[in-house]
Amino acid sequence: MNKNNKKPKSGVKLYKKPQNKFKSAENQAGENESVRLNRYLASSGICSRRKADEYIAAGLVKVNGTTVTKMGVCVTPTDKVEFDGKLIKNEKKQYILLNKPKGYITTTDDPFERKTVMVLVSNACRERIFPVGRLDRNTTGLLLFTNDGELAKKLTHPGYKIRKVYYAYLDHNLKPADQKKLSEGIELDDGMIRPDLVSFVKADDRKLVSVELHSGKYHVVKRMFESLDYQVVRLDRVAFAGLTKKDIPRGKWRALSEKEVAFLKMLR
């Protein structure tokens, strides 16, 4: 707000560094009711801030009907922002954690009209959310949904090495020699995979194996075991980026707490 308690005029303006160098970007946005355009795009779930800069430079973004190609431009809540010809809104950020059951595919839409995970979170919030990463149709367990494009990009980027834990139910007992091979690393068609930990969930059950890894490669757990002549009968993701299935029945969801969201944003 200015000294006269008037709203800033709508329009495009260059970003000005706040006088107090210790103010966060969030506080600055709250006080001035303006935010950088790249952050606005990321907060709308369009893309990451880095990708937003590329879109701006390419001339794909308009503010109040004018194409913007400069970096550092700010917008206010009253500004009309368009991306690739479509009006976008800076919606409230939502973070929903689902314990996915079998039989649902991880997509926002399916041309074959199969059941999608979106049905399970249809009443979670008004905002349009999307799954972060994917689980196979018959893989169960944790699946995060959000409209925070920047966080979603971070959690799926291989550079961040997000921790995941799977329980794999095998068709026969895992031999000690094969457990050692898995722990030392398995060469697959698309490169070497070395899990962080391969252990047994129960001491007396060598068919139930816990696999902790950071890879996001397609079907990676199943392919690891198949390379050693094991079939994964069931696969359940029990942990993702520090989140667990505690108190979430199969097929149900819950919203993340502010503390959990802050933790995810701090991951490096």
Image: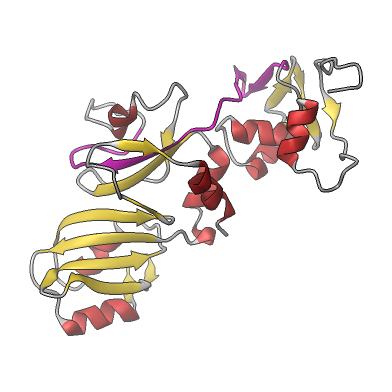
Judging depth in this view, the residue of 88 and 8 nearest the camera is 8
User: Residue farthest to the left?
Assistant: 172
Judging depth in this view, the residue of 78 and 248 nearest the camera is 248
Residue 210 rendering spot, x and y as whole percentages: 25, 67
- Decide if residue 227 is on the left or right side of residue 239: left
- Decide if residue 40 is on the left or right side of residue 264: right
Magenta-highlighted residues: 78-107
Residue 34 rendering spot, x and y as whole percentages: 76, 27
Residue 93 rendering spot, x and y as whole percentages: 53, 32
**Would you place residue 127 above or below residue 239 in this image?**
above
The answer to which quarter of the image holds residue 180 is bottom left
Residue 205 rendering spot, x and y as whole percentages: 11, 71
Q: Residue at x 74, y 20 (%)?
A: 63
Q: Based on the picture, tell me whether residue 26 belongs to the magenta stretch.
A: no
Q: Based on the picture, tell me whether residue 105 belongs to the magenta stretch.
A: yes
**Would you place residue 215 above or below residue 139 in this image?**
below
- Decide if residue 198 is on the left or right side of residue 145: left
Q: Main secondary structure of the magenta part?
A: loop
**Would you place residue 79 above or below residue 45 in this image?**
above
Image quadrant occupied by the N terminus: top right
Q: Residue at x 14, y 68 (%)?
A: 230
The answer to which quarter of the image holds residue 54 is top right
Q: Is residue 68 visible?
A: no
Q: Residue at x 18, y 42 (%)?
A: 102
